[in-house]
Structures are given as C-alpha cells and as structure tokens.
Image: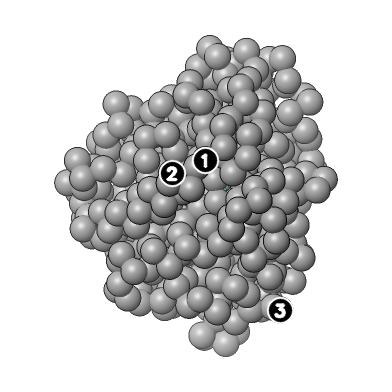
Amino acid sequence: MDSNRDPFSPAQLGPVQLRNRVVKAATFEGMTGDQHVSDRLIEFHRQVAAGGVGMTTVAFLAVSPEGAATPNELVLTDGAVPRLRELAEVVHAEGAAVSAQIGHAGAVAASAGIRGVAPSPVFSPLAMKRTREVTPAEIERILDDFASGALRLKQAGFDAVEVHFGHGYLVSEFLSPKINNRRDQWGGSLENRARFAREVAKRVRDAVGPEMAILAKLNMDDGVPGGFWIDESIEVARMLERDGALDAIEPTCGSSLQNPMYLFRGEPPIAEMAESMPKAVALGAKLFGRFFLKTYPFEEGYLRTHARQLRAAIEMPIVLLGGISRRETIEQAMDDGFDFVAMGRALLREPGLINAMTKGESRESLCIHCNKCMASIYQGTHCVLVPEAERA
Ligand SMILES: Cc1cc2nc3c(=O)[nH]c(=O)nc-3n(C[C@H](O)[C@H](O)[C@H](O)COP(=O)(O)O)c2cc1C
C-alpha cells in the first residue's frame, strides 16, 4: 500500500498532525450532567485516546443554551474552558489529538423542554411541540455563538473543532428544502439555504485562525422525501471548498428530527429508549415508536457509495463515516481516496480497537450494531456488552 495512504501512519489534517487516520466519531457521552465536564467524561476520552485513535471527538457541545438537545449537554461558556483544558491535556498525554463537535440543535432542542427554533416552524415529534421561526437577529447571535464557542475550544487547547451541519440540527434544517420555507436571504434557493452553513464555517475560521483544524459533519441525505439530498449536498460541499474555511468534510446522513435510524441503520432499541428517556420524551417515543424509529438494514461501510460521489466532486479531505468496523473497510476507504475514517459504535464497544488492529491482533470490531448504546446517552454513553468494571 502507498505509505501516504497507510491508515495507521501519521497524516496531516489541516494544521494538525494526527498519528493515524482514524478519528473517534462524535457520540454524545451524556457525561456532562449539571453542564460541567465530569471526571467520567475525561476518563472516557482518555480510554479512547489510549486505544490508539489519531483523534477523539468530544460531543455534543451546544453553542448557546437554547441549542442544547438535552438538558445534560454542555453549553460552551467561558466557565467550561478550564475543565475542557484538563480533558485536552489528558488526551494529549495519551498521544491523540482532540476535537469537539459544536452545534445548535435547532428544532431537535425542543426535546429539552423548551420551545426550539428552526428556520421555519416545524413540528418536533421529540418534544411534541411546534418550534418557532428563528429571527434574523437570532441568526446573527447564533453565528457569533459558533465563533465564540470555537474560540473557547482553542483557549482550552483543542486541536480541532467539528461544526455540526447534519442530522436535522439547526444548520441542516437551514439546508433542507423541506424544513426551510423562509423567503429572506436565508431561505429559498440553494445558495440562500447554504448561506448559514457557509457563514458558520467562515466565522469559526475567523475566530480560531489558521492553527486549528475545522471539520464539518455535513448531511448527504436527510432520508426524508423532499429533504436535503446528495445532489444539493455536493453543491454545498463545493461552495464550502471554494470558501476555504474548512480542512475536511465528514459526510453523514439522517435526521434526529425526522428519521433518526437512517443515520445508524439496524434495529431501533425502542424499549430501551422509552425506559431511559426523560418522561416527556419517553411518552413521544412510546406513542410514535416504530413509526418514528424505522428499521434499515445495517451494512458495513453503508455511507461509502454516497460519499464516493462527494469524493469525485471535491478536492478537500473527506472523513468516511458510517458502519466502519473492519480493517479491510478502512483500507478500502484509503483506496477510494478518502483521507480519514471516523468510527463511533465500534469504538464504544472496543476503545482499544485501533491498537489491536495496528498490532495485527484484530481485523474486525466486536460491535454487533444492536444500537442499545443509543439508549444509554441519558446515563452515560456506553456499550451494553462492555463489562461495567471496564467502562469509563
Ligand atoms: C450513542 C451515540 C451517540 C451519538 N451522538 C452523536 C452526536 O452527538 N453527534 C453526532 O454528530 N453524531 C452522533 N452519533 C452518530 C455517530 O457520530 C455516527 O454518525 C454514527 O453512529 C455512524 O457511525 P458508526 O457506524 O461508526 O457508529 C451518535 C451515535 C451513537 C451510537
């Protein structure tokens, strides 16, 4: 294999050198109760870093209080910086780089018991409420929140920031022709719907300067008829590339608001979800259950074919994500021209998987994609098959 494409050799992500091309994907850890960085969160990322990844991703950090999807998410305030710095130091001591995913949950935030905002009013099945339209003044304020949130991560010593442009969160709602019915400069044509994403990327770059890597997790397909789809996603990726603010795109799909299981594939853990959720949300889960949480067959590397369209369209580094659990899929990704891979569930199951793969001790994750980890996010995200004593 071309040594430049050896997934287990060092690689450059914008200004940051990673020891290999494997990134721990954002999996909300549910370890920021009382909105502070807990020792458990630090231990979670220490384990992932010690397990051999090039970079871990702390998730999900809301840029403003009304942008938090659940009440136990960290909001990126000045007060969060000292403990985030501790986390970054612990990860660095294990030889990995550290990133954090920042975003605004938009209509998905309605599940936090507040009335969420969206580009246009939309019913949130999570909150069983209709959201309200975000005003132009609020849009400006949220853009500033993205910039100041990213700057706080820089102050905390983070190497990278990942802006969330997917999953039916606010930026992805702006991109969606189905949800965004605005008639101002933020809605209508693709150029207008993409304006918010482009502004976020530019403002974050202006805030952090050239020393930090910026990734965008961008939807390729909302998984909803009439939603944002790959043809438009490619155009948006081209616009983002022309703007020059980003170092990489991580294509994703699905919508926490409209079709969550499209994002994960496999069986939805409905009973476990209803049991673990806060009461108001659990009621929604029970009522909507199977209707909202559809079943899609899980396939190894299930986003590869979509992502290859994007690969052919842009030069910018791309992080392949989605159902990666085998060494051969990682190698295939390199052969396809992807620059990095991101892994979520496989690393929840085995934080040490990359070390094991590098040493030749493992070729395939033990993750069976049962999705029961999804239901654990309210108590501290973990794989139910990992013995309690080994968990963070
Ligand atoms: C428990 C759990 C929590 C997740 N939380 C987030 C999140 O906070 N932000 C995000 O963009 N994606 C989140 N995801 C989605 C993953 O980042 C990833 O897109 C998805 O799991 C597919 O990758 P995988 O097959 O490697 O797990 C989460 C996934 C799981 C399983």
Tell me which corner region of the image, top left, top right, bottom left or bottom right, holds residue 370.
top right
Q: Residues within 10 Å of mark 2 (few under 14, many from 20)?
A: few
Residue 6: x, y in percent?
53, 78
Front-most of residues 391 and 72: 72
Q: Residues within 10 Å of mark 1 (few under 14, many from 20)?
A: some
Looking at the image, residue 18 lies above or below residue 362:
below
* Residue labelled 3 has its Cβ within 8 Å of some atom of ligand 1: no
Q: Secondary structure at mark 1?
A: loop
Q: Secondary structure at mark 2?
A: helix
Q: Residue 323 at what x, y percent from top left? A: 66, 52
Q: Residues within 10 Å of mark 3 (few under 14, many from 20)?
A: few
Report if residue 36 is visible in the image.
yes
Instruction: Name the disc covering residue 312, or none.
Output: 3
**What amino acid is found at the position of numbered circle 2 in the picture?**
Glu
Q: Which numbered dot is residue 138?
A: 2
Locate residue 56, reporting x and y percent.
40, 55
